Amino acid sequence: MSSGNLHPRDTPDPSAPPIQVVGLHKSFGDHEVLKGIDLTIERGQVVCVIGPSGSGKSTLLRSVNLLEWPTKGKVVIEGIDITDPDVNLDKIRTRIGMVFQQFNLFPHMTVLRNITISQEKVLQRSKAEAEEVARAMLERVGLSDKVDAHPSQLSGGQQQRVAIARSLAMNPDMMLFDEPTSALDPELVGEVLDVMQSLANEGMTMMVVTHEMGFAREVGTRLIFIDEGVIVEEGDPREVLSDPQHPRTQSFLSKVL
Amino acid sequence: MALVDIRPTVRRRISQTLIWIGALVVILLIALMADWENIRKQFLNVAVMKDLWPEIVLVGMRNTLIYTFISFIVGTALGTVFALMKMSKGPFSWFATAYIELFRGIPALLTIFAMTFILPIAFGVKIVGGAVGSACLGLVIVTSAYTAEIMRAGIEAVPKGQREAARSLGMSPVQTTLFIILPQGFRIVIPPMTNEFVMLLKDSSLIFIAGLTPPTKELTAFARDGLSTYGSPTPLILAAILYLIVTIPLTMLIGKLEKKLAVRK
Ligand SMILES: Nc1ncnc2c1ncn2[C@@H]1O[C@H](COP(=O)(O)OP(=O)(O)OP(=O)(O)O)[C@@H](O)[C@H]1O
Ligand SMILES: [Mg+2]
């Protein structure tokens, strides 16, 4: 767990694309969920992923930071093949923020501690430094007054914004979002999307699984439609949404729009 | 007879009152039939009580609490290790399963017996604390087998997303377990662990099999001595009361905790 001196293998290449997925297959038992995904996400892109339930969107997103281990294929983060078993995966994960549908805040800790613990334990920041960063991130998501609250005292929208602040505190180069607003009451969706939009405006590389077509259209730089484990169609969000080419995209969009 | 129209709430109150009256009558009848003079002399002999006091607390009760606390703390630590082993993959898991099933499957008395008499002979080992130490080791082993299962259930009750969130922040598996999973698991297991403590408190009476010297006697052994010395069951009654003073508040606490945890879900 050496944090200071990185093995050359673990050194990111700033000119390489943040996320590259090559020939990715994933099966659960006999069930093949991803059937060969190739995907490159360039710096600053906001890639939205849509598709029917069970099509493999979450599995693809979770493969990017190896919460799911591919059955076949490679995941390359900033030029490093992270499926190489010799790679320091924990180190690389600090550069990939992840936001979950169910927030997954640590319920036994205050908001502040939620945001400082991994800074201290993983990045070896001092307590004072970690708290300074945490307060700055909470201000960024508009929750400075919730420093000492416990997650159970917050609304869903507030919890999700804390979760985003927790990821940002690790200074990630990219962020993954898995349906970040799907568990929220409709009136709380906006506050979370606003935070995501400002992140996008600041140039964060983002991969977002979502059902929010408005967000995909306004904020996304690229839209990917997945069905039955393959990328069926991709392109500029406005074009795909208004003029889908593939019949499966057309039928999916006609149901959700 | 014209039945008066009685509201259900009133009817329920009447029948409840009748049940109470009936129960009271039964208790009264039993009390009248009992030979109170004899009971007082035999079971609640004041002279015997005066003689036992305060040694029954300062020696018997004290030793019971010491043996229970030590066995509980060491047994829980060991049980947590076995729980983690069982949830891992490979030979450790297999070993932990065998250990847990073995010591949950045989009577605690046999385990204590084995630690006291078989272990020293079979392996020539000497256990710190002599007979009492060996007997406590037996209690530790029994407790660890039960707490391992409690801990495993507690850890598995922590939502999967907690581990995923911690790992995606770059925490190692060990850090995730120590800082995220175990603290939450411990909260979930407080009620079953309190229950386990009550069981252990009572099981500590099995230590007698190791052969205790007067200063190391725990509450039950102390009371049995009294039984033979005075030829009166009074010491046993006194011991029972002392056990209850500890166990009843704990049992009530479990009930409260379970209600509280249920509400939070
Ligand atoms: N851990 C797992 N074990 C077995 N099967 C799984 C597992 N995770 C996902 N699956 C299966 O893989 C398929 C794709 O799941 P995935 O969660 O990626 O879909 P999704 O596109 O995100 O759907 P949704 O929109 O409902 O979230 C589903 O059929 C699911 O049942
Ligand atoms: Mg999903």
Image (cartoon, rainbow, N blue to C red):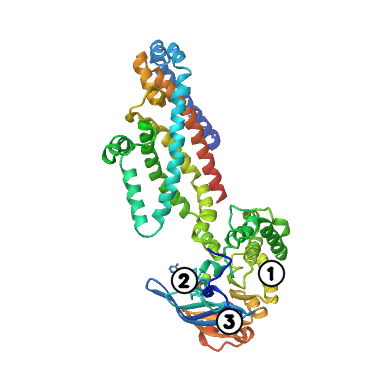
How far, Cα to Cα, is label 1 from label 3? 27 Å
Q: Which residue is mark 1?
A: A195
Can residue B7 be seen here?
Answer: no
Which numbered marker is on residue A12? none
Q: Which residue is mark 2?
A: A86
How far, Cα to Cα, is label 2 from label 1? 36 Å
* A83 left or right of A127 in image: left
Q: Secondary structure at mark 1?
A: helix
Image coordinates for residue A226, horizontal then vertical, percent? 51, 80
Image coordinates for residue B150, horizontal then vertical, percent? 43, 47
Can residue A56 be seen here?
Answer: yes
- Tell me which corner region of the image, top left, top right, bottom left or bottom right, holds residue B204: top left
Sequence order check: which comes first, mark 1 or mark 3?
3
Image coordinates for residue B72, horizontal then vertical, percent? 45, 39
Given residues A168 and B254, the one toward you in this image is A168
Image coordinates for residue B62, horizontal then vertical, percent? 47, 27
Q: Secondary structure at mark 2?
A: loop
* B230 left or right of A187 in image: left
Q: Secondary structure at mark 3?
A: loop
Sequence order check: which comes first, mark 3 or mark 2?
3
Given residues A125 and B88, the one toward you in this image is A125
Q: Is residue A181 above or below residue B65?
A: below
Q: Are marks 3 and 2 in contact (CB under 8 Å)?
A: no
Which numbered marker is on residue A16? 3
Neighbor class of circle 3 (other Cα within 10 Å; few <14, some 14-19, many 20+) is: some
Please name the amino acid that badge 3 sits on. Ala
Please name the amino acid that badge 1 sits on. Val
Please name the amino acid that badge 2 sits on. Asp
